[in-house]
Image (spheres, grey):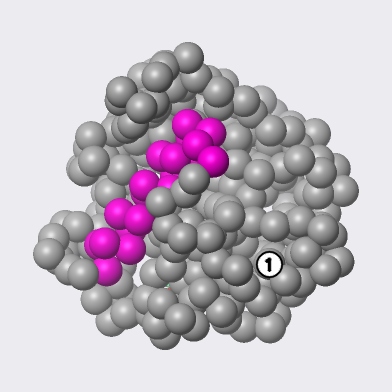
Amino acid sequence: MVCTQSTTGNLNLMNNPTHISQPFVFAVISGKGGVGKSMASINTASMLNKMGYKVAIIDADLGLANCATLFNEAVHNTVSRWINGDCILEDLPQDCSGITLVTGANSPEENKFDTSIFMDALDQVAEYLKQDHDFIIIDTPAGIGEMGLWALDAAGASILVLVDEPAAISDVYRLCKYVFNIDPEYRFASIVNFAESEETAESTFKRFNTILNYFLKKQTAYFGFIPSSESVRKAVAKQHTLLQANPGHEILTEFEFISQNIIAYANNQEELVTKTVH
Ligand SMILES: Nc1ncnc2c1ncn2[C@@H]1O[C@H](COP(=O)(O)OP(=O)(O)OP(=O)(O)O)[C@@H](O)[C@H]1O
Ligand SMILES: [Mg+2]
């Protein structure tokens, strides 16, 4: 069942605002494919890492995993190989430029086990990673398949990747409706990708939230936007994070805002860094 995870800590956040009270797991999800989930996952991971946090990514796109490729790394071991008895749990994490990556299954042939076995194994992976990471990002396949549901359940909150297309918005709306039916308190935040400008991003987010509010009486928090950018596209093509490809790029400030909002959310802070869009 989809559930929320308490992130209430016991540390005085006023004295140490960037401390993460306990490991925060969040899923990056969308209704439609190709909207930039993996791009957002690796770049947010690298920004959080630059800010001093220990970050892990679980690539839950079983069979079509591509986070390792985006880091220009070959996959070493996979959860599938672990289930098969070909490696041990401790062999799964691989270092990708300071970020820990665990890949579920690297090819469709590897994705041969019962989903429930995979889910159980991924639960154990998440628990294992929580021991020494501040953030665990779950990169999901598009839509609301079984792995998407696993990710929503394993995460304390999920980030919806919105793009300004009617089909994409209606897919995300249906995804949210499905989840809110199971867990009305589920915590969603939104980022807008492929945005033409900050204004259009905010208007896309506002439109989406208006629909959610009108039909479901629900809202999502606004975490920021990523512009449609040739530099982002080129960094992906070169298999680099934007920080690696172009460390001074202005778009990194957007990833910084997104990361700061994730940190605030992880610590259950009411006030997000970016302004709430009305
Ligand atoms: N802001 C952006 N500007 C330019 N290109 C982008 C941007 N975001 C993503 N892309 C490009 O869009 C393509 C899809 O991105 P990505 O693989 O991250 O999507 P996805 O949602 O993970 O896809 P899937 O649903 O297949 O897993 C990539 O080629 C990437 O370079
Ligand atoms: Mg992807």
From the top left corner, tell me how far across and down residue 183 is, in percent.
Answer: 81, 40
Residue 33's place in the image compared with 220, above or below, is: below
x, y percent for residue 123: 60, 26
Q: Is residue 119 left or right of residue 71?
A: right
Q: Is residue 66 left or right of residue 219?
A: left
Residue 13 higher or lower than 199, as above or below: above
Seen from the viewer's position, the closer of residues 138 and 121 is 138
Query: Residue 2: x percent and y percent?
Result: 76, 37
Quarter of the picture containing the C terminus is: bottom right
Describe the element under mark 1 as helix, strand or loop. helix
Residue 278 drawn above or below residue 270: below
Occupied quadrant, residue 72: bottom left
The boundaries of the magenta stretch are 251-270
Predominant secondary structure in magenta? helix
Name the residue: 50% across, 19% down: 9
Q: Is residue 254 magenta?
A: yes
Residue tagged by mark 1?
209
- Residue 60 seen: no
At x 56% / y 45%, what residue is drawn?
A: 27
- Against 27, is 251 above or below? below
